[in-house]
Amino acid sequence: MGRISLPHTTAPGPTKPEVRAILLRTLDLQPEDHFVDVGAGTGAVTIEAAQVTKRVTAIEKDGDRVDAIRANLEASASGGRVTVRHATAPNGLPDSAEAVFLGGTQNLEAVLNWVTQAEPRQVVLNAARLETATNAIESFENRGFDPSVRRISVGRGESLAGETAIVPDRPVYMITGTPGEDG
């Protein structure tokens, strides 16, 4: 993956570079895939996916974040293959996709109903809160997505009394499922 530029941000998200690396590896994007990023935030996942696959659709409900996504796409020279839609999912979602990332969980049940119909090869949801992760696991199971769960924790070195201490970032729960498989 090439380096990405995110000069425009509206809020820090749980999808840090290390988490994105695991996410993109899990999605196993192929050049011909259509990737959908639901709750695209500042576009970090969108931009990295656009380096791999020919078609990306980013859905974001917050207008300021939509502007940030577009600015970050331009700064990263990734705009040509990306469609950014200002909508609250499931509105604005395309008819199909090979891979889906759920970065936001608003309207989760309706979005997962869309996922069921779109039948992507893989769907991944990141959750920063335990209750959200638990709800997502149950929702995946109810649809036969056979979820797998990872807890990802990243620590960063910081100076402490002349030595290095590892300061942990907030952990992220990554829930992965394959629509259409029996649970």
Image (cartoon, rainbow, N blue to C red):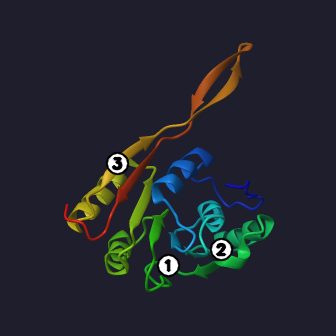
Question: Is residue 14 in view?
Answer: no
Foreground tag (2 vs 3): 3
CA distance for labels 1 and 3: 26 Å
Q: Quadrant of the N terminus?
A: bottom right
Closer to us: 91 or 25: 25
In this view, 95 is above or below 4: below
Q: Is residue 7 left or right of residue 143?
A: right
Residue 107's image quarter?
Answer: bottom left
At 27% across and 64% down in the image, what residue appears?
A: 145
Question: Which amino acid, mark 3?
Answer: Val
Report crowding for label 1: few under 14, some 14 to 19, many 20 or more residues within 10 A (C-alpha). Answer: some
Q: Is residue 111 left or right of residue 69?
A: left
Q: Which residue is mark 1?
A: 88
Badge number at residue 149: 3
At 52% across and 41% down in the image, what residue appears?
A: 170
Foreground tag (1 vs 3): 3
